[in-house]
Amino acid sequence: MSTAEILTEQAAERLPDALREEILEIAAHEAHPRAACIEALSRVQHEFRWVSDAHLREVAGLLGMSAADLDGVATYFNLIFRRPVGRRVLLLCDSVSCWLMGRERIDAHLRQRLGIRPGQTTPDGDVTLLPTVCLGHCDHAPALMLGDELHGDVDEQRIDAILGLQPETGE
Amino acid sequence: MIERPLTGRIRPGAPPPDREAYERTGGYQAMRRALLHMTPEDVVGDVTKSGLRGRGGAGFGTGQKWSFVPKPRAGQRRYLVANADEMEPGTFKDRLLLEGDPHQMVEAVIVSAYALAATDAYIFVRGEYKLAIARLKQAIGEATAAGYLGADILGSGYALSLHLHASAGRYICGEETALLTALEGRRALPRSKPPFPQVSGLWGAPSVVNNVETLCNVPHIVNNGPDWFKGLGIGPDGGTKLYGVSGRVKRPGAWELPIGTPLRKILEDHAGGMQDGYQLRALLPGGASTAFLGADQLDIPMDYGSVEKAGSRLGTGTAIVLDDRACPVGMIRNLEHFFAQESCGWCTPCRDGLPWVERMLQALEEGDGEDEDLHQLERHVGLLGMGRTFCAHAPGAMAPLGSGLQKFRDEFAQHVHQHRCPWPAAGVH
């Protein structure tokens, strides 16, 4: 079974009771339950890596929103993933300071080393490569985020080390 | 000795001061002074007299912004929001304040919320700022445990709930009405003004949205007085400013300096000048949505009025440097890609105009541009300008384009007539 199939299967399951409770608890503290929707989607994503249709419908139900309404919010935000992603998500800044400092070279290197284009996941389900807007790390451009970790002043060698890739043999 | 009230406690690379360390160096004194010895009107008065202007980009007078909030009514919720959605490309100043001194942010919110008689406050922080989020959570926990948040703070009778909202990534949330819409759990579309948020903001209640750096000045104004604050600046504006420089300079970074410090001093003394082998071509003085200034304009003081007179805006005060080895058209294409992607899609000129602008710039870069494209780009600067769109997003996007078309007329023409980008692949050496 491929990683994508496993993820898809998990994503069809009902949300764990503890997570449902958490979401209801956050919603109860807001002036209106829907105010909790970004936090709720983020928590679902934290547990399942992405937000499936089934989970989206379930969260919408908990917050008294229609699924279409919540999907409108979910798809509006860059960091809510509505498609499966890899175990690690690499966000490579594509904004101006990083561009000036040579981010196109980093992008080309990543495509070559991972064998994928931005928006894709490596076939083993390890890494999803995504472009992102300015990470606010412009004094250390080019910058990227891997998972929750911010990395600056990256070059080809540093990227390989950050990703734990074997050095290139030069062949 | 330059006074650095905002960054005095920040030690790069070291963990931020915890509550006790913050208090040992005078922290939470402004909160005590305001809540126990001043009326909310006194605090608003001091902020107004100080001349503090917004540090997020627009430069609106903070005291004036606060003055539009109606008198409190019993039982009515009122909101203060710290705008920590720092997503303007080339801007990295608020992150330093949030990560380096989170208790300063918390105290700033308490004092400002008290001034506005707010019942609830939010810190709206972009989701990518993981370290800032973790440190703010810690600081809010410590402040709550000490009785600085919650009911009857310091026995003053004033109560405040402070919530931390981690956003999920959208530049337009930095626009105050879009931010409020996002807090309501909706697609973050800007709202029409009037009504202004001070009258009808979050859930229809009076709400004030201020930038992180703006708010962080408030405790220092309360502690030291408006005259002290005015004296910190060099020119007509009061206070200090976090200035930054990114691009091919020797020491990219951010520095707290007297507001009105000349651009040349920031670039040469603090950023160390250009890297060897690179010449300064032009720069965006205050983030992606400010107009280019040329290398011949470095002697302007970086205050609101002077930068405007020079044809640009102070913006966020963090400059992006274009060197002679990067293609100006490529740089502008990169900027317009950002603005096209981050358009909220609500109004037609912005939603459809920005991608068109991006495609024309892309065509120029790929050698498919024509003279007519240059004319079309110029037309769009007007068509997407101030007053033609629902909010300031597209007009902001036109600032680097309009000024770039003037400053780099020859380079644009070269792209057309040589049918290629004259710079090497990717436009950057």
Image (cartoon, coloured by chain):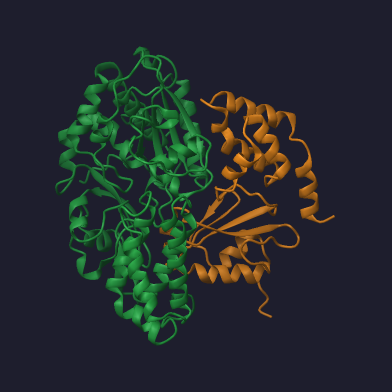
Chain colours: A orange, B green
Q: Is A83 on the left or on the right of B337, as rendered?
A: right
Displayed quadrant of residue B114: top left
Displayed quadrant of residue B373: bottom left
Which is nearer the eye, B276 or A11? A11
Which is nearer the eye, B195 or B395? B195
Residue B287 position, x and y percent, is 35, 56
Residue B328 position (above or below residue B218): below
Residue B355 position, x and y percent, is 47, 64
Residue A51 position, x and y percent, is 67, 44
- Tell which residue pokes out farthest to the right in this image: A1
- Tell which residue pokes out farthest to the bottom in this image: B418
Asked if residue B103 can be seen in this view, the reply is yes
Residue A144 position, x and y percent, is 53, 58
Q: Is B358 on the left or on the right of B284, as rendered?
A: right
Total labels: the figure holds 0
Residue B385 position (above or below residue B49): below
Q: Quadrant of the C terminus of chain B?
A: bottom left
Displayed quadrant of residue B334: bottom left
Please report the residue visible at 50 percent of the width from the left and 67 percent of the height from the top. A103
Which is nearer the eye, A29 or B3? A29
Please report the residue visible at 40 percent of the width from the left and 15 percent of the height from the top. B75
Residue B169 position (above or below residue B297): above
Asked if residue B301 can be seen in this view, the reply is no
Q: Is B326 on the left or on the right of A5, as rendered?
A: left
